[in-house]
């Protein structure tokens, strides 16, 4: 007989997490809905993944609890509940009742007490799952009890067992009550023992097993800790009464299911709030089978669990698979071994080189790849499907897109390879529902071979120049370190913020600018720059420290890694297409997209990276592409006129904001306008703009108002874009690329503003990234194929390598391909440069 499975849910905790994780969402009547939508998204994921026989949600009741009787100031400092949250609680209760989900509440007790009691008492004949992010609930972990702990936004969940808890924390779950009594809980205003933080509490409990054991061995601790334990040990024992859950509560009234599901009622509530019916599917499984896609907006969802997976049948010779209409191909982590499977379960596994030698196996058939970029070079993959690309399109802010992550951790082999078939079917259906099929086929998949060819082309390293530059950096570091040591009067670790702080503010007596969160001296760049301005004429140490940091970063962060990465005089960076939320590319091992060419040292570094003997770089950089995209998306008349006339956008913007002629705009005013434009494009608030411009908030607000008054189309676009993203739950580029907002939020209240900024900026930055990718595909198709390799893509520029005599014609062709990649309502423009080193372009 299969053991019953019961899911217990911390109602208020999960609802609060959803409220602060998701951006503001409202129904047509103005009712806020983000907490309700997020709550049922998280609950639905748990129900779908774990298929419980019963779900019970516990809520706190208004009024004092027994803990207030023990400690009058319990939860005294909690801020007032936002009214936007409170108005959603009746909606959550109504939907729970319609879904047939029981609710637990009890006067004088908290939801955690009810969950703890249910877990302790019901786990004897049922498997208990608890959906909660509260640390208090960890104390009930044990045989038959597992906690599903939300890890990010409303998407990711960490599964915690008694074993995994003990491994992470260093003590058994039952001692969580002692841990909380030692460190305290600021959220609930529970006092702890001063100076006892997370690490100290874990060490003490691991060694002595309880607060009583710790107090018995207090004499073995440092004098400071011994004193604190003596003063606050008795308090910790009393505090433990607050942190311990009431597992002895009589749960008889909650033992049996009482609520009955009513699908029509559930959907009626959703309809009244204009919420998609997909929210109901986990609770009414028959709906998913009978309901078509319809005209509803698609909702962001995780990869759904597929119950029936194809299983390996027989191992066959590689050539036997030639007759299969579809094949799945996976490659081992070391890149040496391939696994090929047919839908019927026939499989082959062997050296990847052998698969490359059998050109007919993959030709003229659909091939599903776990990582198409790693399989580059296999004949017949031009029309293949790629798992990493497909999953990235749906979840651009997540990091796990590979088959090992999506196949339940299966090891490399035919069973894992066969998972590609159902994953492809599932992901393709979702991609189609968002209208991204064409984007995947024409942009993201064709880009992959272009990236591989760019990696293979590489960038030449001038070895002797790099050796000389490295020696120069080392000599400069020795000189600067020696000068600082004369002021220190003895040995000092210049990489230690603590020792540097003591030198500056104790030995040299310089004014303390700010403190760290741990109350230590801050010695960050802003502090050193402030000291340079205030005391630099009498004390050179702050300036020397800044120079030391620049030299150290240049040596260890750039010169050494670049020299180490050089193979046969070439540096072959890895370019990733599935790592950024906006769709931009990234570079690693080494990173060639973030070279510091803004300083003299940076220029010297970039002069070590060359086009090789007899070669030159030709680079073309999109001019103001994000602002041109903004003009296109917003339709703002004045922006379009400026770009069509070829006038300077920042000068014209300054003139509009300040109400002066364009020819009267100063460099400083132009710089201000540029800051305003990009600040607002990235969703900056008046507070942020005030800080950036070093003006008051009222003045910053006035500047923002003047900007939007001059460009009303931009204001309308921003407001409409944010509203649409909130309604749908994701932002979208001009070419259909989505960015789910719940996956960029982290759950903190301040991150609601971050989600708004993403909703504003992602369509613009993502569209610009899409255009650059399309241009790269065109360049690869025409120039790389003609013997002019593309070697680098940085920001909005593409760099090719050619000969000096062909540089002019290549520059013209490169500009033609980039400006003609797409057609916007405003013209695209590029600036081209030619040079022998990256410092020149």
Image (cartoon, rainbow, N blue to C red):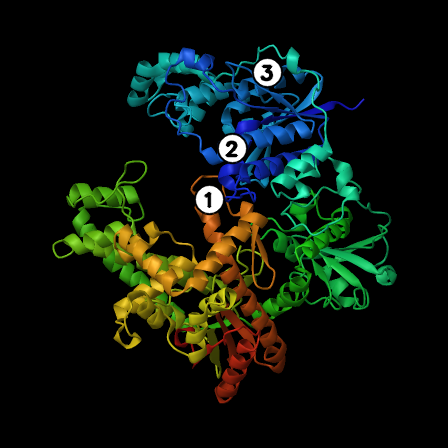
Alpha carbon of mark 3 to alpha carbon of mark 1: how far? 34 Å
How far across and down, in percent of the image, does residue 199 sit?
Answer: 42, 29
- To which residue does mark 1 refer? 752
**Would you identify the image quadrant in which residue 578 lies?**
bottom right
The quarter in which the C terminus is drawn is: bottom left
Say which mark, if any, is on residue 117.
3
Q: Is residue 767 visible?
A: yes
Judging depth in this view, the residue of 462 and 691 nearest the camera is: 691
Residue identified by numbered label 2:
87
Query: As displayed, is residue 361 above or below residue 210?
Result: below
Marks 2 & 1, CB-CB < 8 Å contact: no
55 left or right, relative to 192: right
Q: CA distance from mark 2 to mark 1?
A: 18 Å
Which residue is at a point 75% across and 37% down the rendered structure image? 285
Judged left or right of residue 588, residue 225 is: left
Picture coordinates of residue 63 (x, y %)? 46, 17
In primary-sequence order, the first of circles 3 and 1 is 3
Residue situated in front as seen by the camera: 353 or 162: 162
What residue is rendered at 33% in x and 68% in y? 656
- Locate the N terminus and report the quarter of the image it occupies: top right
Q: Nearer the viewer, mark 3 or mark 1?
A: 1
User: Which residue is situated farthest in the bottom direction here?
Assistant: 805
Q: Position of residue 204 (x, y in %)?
A: 42, 22
């Amino acid at each position: 007989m299969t053991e019953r499975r019961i899911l217990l849910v911390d109602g208020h905790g999960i609802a609060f997490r959803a409220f602060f994780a998701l951006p503001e969402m409202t129904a047509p009547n103005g009712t806020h809905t983000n907490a309700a939508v997020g709550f049922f998204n998280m609950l639905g994921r748990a129900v779908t993944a774990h298929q419980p026989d019963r779900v019970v949600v516990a809520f706190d009741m208004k009024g004092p609890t027994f803990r207030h009787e023990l400690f009058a100031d319990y939860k005294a400092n909690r801020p007032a509940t936002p009214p936007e949250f409170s108005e959603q609680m009746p909606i959550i209760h109504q939907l729970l009742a319609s879904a047939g989900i029981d609710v637990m509440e009890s006067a004088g007790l908290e939801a955690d007490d009810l969950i703890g009691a249910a877990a302790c008492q019901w786990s004897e004949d049922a498997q208990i799952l608890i959906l909660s992010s509260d640390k208090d609930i960890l104390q009930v972990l044990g045989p038959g009890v597992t906690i599903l702990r939300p890890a990010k936004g409303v998407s990711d969940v960490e599964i915690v067992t008694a074993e995994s808890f003990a491994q992470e924390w260093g003590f058994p779950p039952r001692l969580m009550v002692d841990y909380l009594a030692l460190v305290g809980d600021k959220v609930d205003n529970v006092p702890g023992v001063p100076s006892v933080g997370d690490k100290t509490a874990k060490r003490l409990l691991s060694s002595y097993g309880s607060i009583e054991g710790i107090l018995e061995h207090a004499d073995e601790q440092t004098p400071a800790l011994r004193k604190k334990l003596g003063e606050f040990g008795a308090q910790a024992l009393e505090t433990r009464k607050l942190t311990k859950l009431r597992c002895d509560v009589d749960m008889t009234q909650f033992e049996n299911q009482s609520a009955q599901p009513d699908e029509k009622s559930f959907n009626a509530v959703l309809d009244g709030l204009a919420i998609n019916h997909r929210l109901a599917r986990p609770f009414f499984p028959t709906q998913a089978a009978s309901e078509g896609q319809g005209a509803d907006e698609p909702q962001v969802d995780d990869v759904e669990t597929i119950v029936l997976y194809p299983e390996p049948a027989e191992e066959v010779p590689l050539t036997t698979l030639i007759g299969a209409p579809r094949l799945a191909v996976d490659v081992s982590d070391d890149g040496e071994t391939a696994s090929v499977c047919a839908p019927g379960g026939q499989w082959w596994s062997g050296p990847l080189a052998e698969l490359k030698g059998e050109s007919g196996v993959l030709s003229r058939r659909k091939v599903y790849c776990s990582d198409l970029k790693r399989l580059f070079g296999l004949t017949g993959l031009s029309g293949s499907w790629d798992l990493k690309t497909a999953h990235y399109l749906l979840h651009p802010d997540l990091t796990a897109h590979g088959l090992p992550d999506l196949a339940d951790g299966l090891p490399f082999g035919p069973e894992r390879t066969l998972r590609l078939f159902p994953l492809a079917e599932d992901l393709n259906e979702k991609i189609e529902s968002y209208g991204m099929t064409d984007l995947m086929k024409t942009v993201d998949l064709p880009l992959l071979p272009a990236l591989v060819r760019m990696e293979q082309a590489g960038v030449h390293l001038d070895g002797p120049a790099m050796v000389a530059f490295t020696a120069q950096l080392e000599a400069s570091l020795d000189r600067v370190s020696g000068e600082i040591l004369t002021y220190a009067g003895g040995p000092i670790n210049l990489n230690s913020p603590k020792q540097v702080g003591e030198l500056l503010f104790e030995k040299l007596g310089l004014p303390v600018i700010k403190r760290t969160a741990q109350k230590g001296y801050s010695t960050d760049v802003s502090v050193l720059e402030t000291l340079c301005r205030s005391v630099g004429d009498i004390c050179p140490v702050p300036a020397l420290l800044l120079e030391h940091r620049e030299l150290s970063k240049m040596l260890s962060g750039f010169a050494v890694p670049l020299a180490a990465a050089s193979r046969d005089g070439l540096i072959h960076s890895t370019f990733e297409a599935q790592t950024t939320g906006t769709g931009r590319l990234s570079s690693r091992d080494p990173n060639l997209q973030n070279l510091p060419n803004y300083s003299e040292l940076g220029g010297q570094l970039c002069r070590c990276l060359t086009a090789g003997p007899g070669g030159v770089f030709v680079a073309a950089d999109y001019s103001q592409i994000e602002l041109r995209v903004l003009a296109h998306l917003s339709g703002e008349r004045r922006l379009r006129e400026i770009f069509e006339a070829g006038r300077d956008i920042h000068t014209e913007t300054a003139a509009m904001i300040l109400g002066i002629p364009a020819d009267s705009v100063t460099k400083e005013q132009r710089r201000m306008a540029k800051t305003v434009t990009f600040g607002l494009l990235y969703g900056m608030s008046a507070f942020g703009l005030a800080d950036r411009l070093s003006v008051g908030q009222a003045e910053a607000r006035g500047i923002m108002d003047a900007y939007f008054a001059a460009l009303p189309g931009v204001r309308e676009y921003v407001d409409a874009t944010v509203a649409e993203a909130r309604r749908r739950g994701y932002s979208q580029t001009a070419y259909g690329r989505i960015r789910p907002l719940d996956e960029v939020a982290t759950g903190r209240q301040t991150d609601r503003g971050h989600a708004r900024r993403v909703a504003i900026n992602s369509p613009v930055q993502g569209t610009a990234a899409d255009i650059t990718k399309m241009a790269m595909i065109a360049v690869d198709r025409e120039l790389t194929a003609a013997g002019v390799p593309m070697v680098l893509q940085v920001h909005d520029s593409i760099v090719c390598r050619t000969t000096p005599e062909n540089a002019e014609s290549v520059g013209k062709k490169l500009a033609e391909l980039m400006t003609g990649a797409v057609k916007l309502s405003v013209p695209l423009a590029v600036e081209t440069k030619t040079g022998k080193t990256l410092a020149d372009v």
